[in-house]
Image: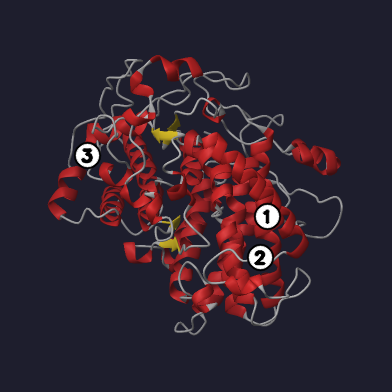
Amino acid sequence: MSAVQQHKIFLYKIIAGLLVAVLIGLSACTKHFEELNTDPTTFSSLTTATIPNAFAKAQYQGIYGDPGIYQLVRNLFVDYWSQYFAVVDPGIPTDRYVLRADWVFYQWGSLYSNAWPTLKLVLDATRNTDAEAYAIAKIWKVYIFHSCTDWYGPIPYSQAGNGELSVGYDSQEFIYDDMLKSLDSAVTTLKAADQARLVYGANDLIFGGSIPKWTKLGNTLRLRLAMRISGVDPARARTEAEAAVASGVLTSIEDNALMDVGPSSPNGLNLMSPWGGFRMSASMESFFKGYDDPRMGEYYSPAEGTGEYNGVRNGLSVAQLAASPKNQGTNLSNVGPRFDVTKANENKLTVMYAAEAYFLRAEGALNGWNMGGTPKDLYEDGIATSMRQWGVTAESAISAYTQGSSTPADLNDFLNSPAVSDIPVLFSTDPEIQREQVGTQKWIALYPDGIEAWAELRRTGYPRLYPLANSDNPDLPVPQIIRRFPYIESEYLTNFTAVQNAVSMLNGPDKPNTRVWWNVE
């Protein structure tokens, strides 16, 4: 069964799920809240007993964990646009920047019909009764909304869930201001709390209720957002970033924010691994082979047909996919062993890595900010932390990699692709090359989080990736990259005035080549 056929099957499930969510709101999603299958709770109320269950549901849905949503939100779009993967199924046009309206809908629908209504109930129920639970829910609200505003620009935020037929949009500048303030207040609350308390208990799918770990996640998310606005508001960005680092960010693999999965809440990427729709990108192949990166065997598997690690260029036409045997899925590398379908119920979903915090700090240090270390040390700590996360523990291997002077490899593919870039791992003395090195290694370390990788690619321009072989979107001729999602059609039909106001807040028309507020690069 092809990836597109699998996709169609999931569409029916998702449509049914969205309708059920709108009607009853709190259906079961993970192993920690199966109780909701029989719980009579509806969107109108939460009890003390059901608040933790609802929070677990908001976590899993907020990260687009449901396999069908995972495919439609992550895999069919941002995983290709970030070039972690490339398409080999001719029935998938999104790798050539075709924005299918029936696919784009599900990110918006999943957030506003499922994740946000549930999380809003949790926030409303804990606002005046449980300060720590409320603070953690506020952090999660920032997590789920920051990716949405980064995709579109202005979105419904302050008025989302107000029960009105017309829901207003907020500017992205307003949203970022509010998110940064929310993180500051949430962390302040958590730091003053009983550090031994386990908020939400086992229903917290990420940290099991650990206040110290949520504090670090809140600070690291604040650091991420600060860096995101560094091009449009450098003074505010510096203030926020320095405050976040001083308060304490993720620093070790034990701090990594990963979400529990289980039989009723599997990892969607694992479930998709045997479908055959995507394989390792040529950009990843060039970097990994040139750097002799020991993580390659963890990220990807040798091709079934050749036993070698091979990637494929993004944006190949249907004809090009058929033109060379090397483009066939069996001759290209699929995901690595931890993403095997048999491990769908145990391979945790990525929320945020400590390695990312080091690369964010390295960039901040290059800006002259106080990030608690030098750019070089933070850069190398980021690489080492990522290596350890993926099972590379020998210090000699990590040191050999960080001191490596080799550059990305030429590819022996049918397009005769040259090396994707000329950047070595060994930290340069040139500040601009240093920025590219930080961006390149951060991109490698963020895998498989295509959402964040695409955002940083748009913000920094790094790493340099292969241009699409073909773009079928007239607004995005090669070598342009896609900058945002246009608003979905149903918003124009049901919320027209609000959408028109949102478009007026953009830096251009409602098209995929218009940059969002922070994307000034």
Measure the C-alpha gap from mark 2 to mark 1: 9 Å
Task: Please give the residue where the numbered disc 1 appears in the rendered image.
Answer: 17
Indicate which disc, 2 or 1, sits on the residue closer to the N terminus.
1
Instruction: Decide if residue 185 is in sight here.
Output: no
Q: Looking at this rendering, what residue extends furthest in the left direction? A: 396
Q: Nearer the viewer, residue 12 or 498?
A: 12
- Identify the residue at horizontal 58%, vertical 42% (top origin): 72
Q: Secondary structure at mark 2?
A: loop
Residue 147 location in percent, x, y?
Answer: 58, 49
Q: Residue at x 15, y 55 (%)?
A: 394
Q: In the figure, 71 relative to 145: above or below?
A: above
Location of residue 172 in the rendering, given as x and y in whole percent from the top left corner: 66, 46
Q: Mark on residue 181?
A: none
- Tally of marks: 3
User: Are there few (<14), some (14-19), or many (20+) residues within 10 Å of tag 3?
Assistant: some
- In the image, what residue occupies the spot 71% across and 69% down? 121
Residue 428 appears left or right of 476 = left
Amino acid carrying mark 3 in the image: Leu
Residue 280 in percent (x, y) is at 37, 34
Q: CA distance from mark 1 to mark 3?
A: 49 Å
Q: Residues within 10 Å of mark 1 (few under 14, many from 20)?
A: some
> Does the rendering let one see residue 162?
yes
Asked if the residue under mark 3 is in contact with the one under mark 1, i.e. CB atoms within 8 Å, the reply is no
Reading the image, the residue beneath label 2 is: 27
Q: Are marks 2 and 1 in contact (CB under 8 Å)?
A: yes
* Image-quadrant location for residue 129: bottom right
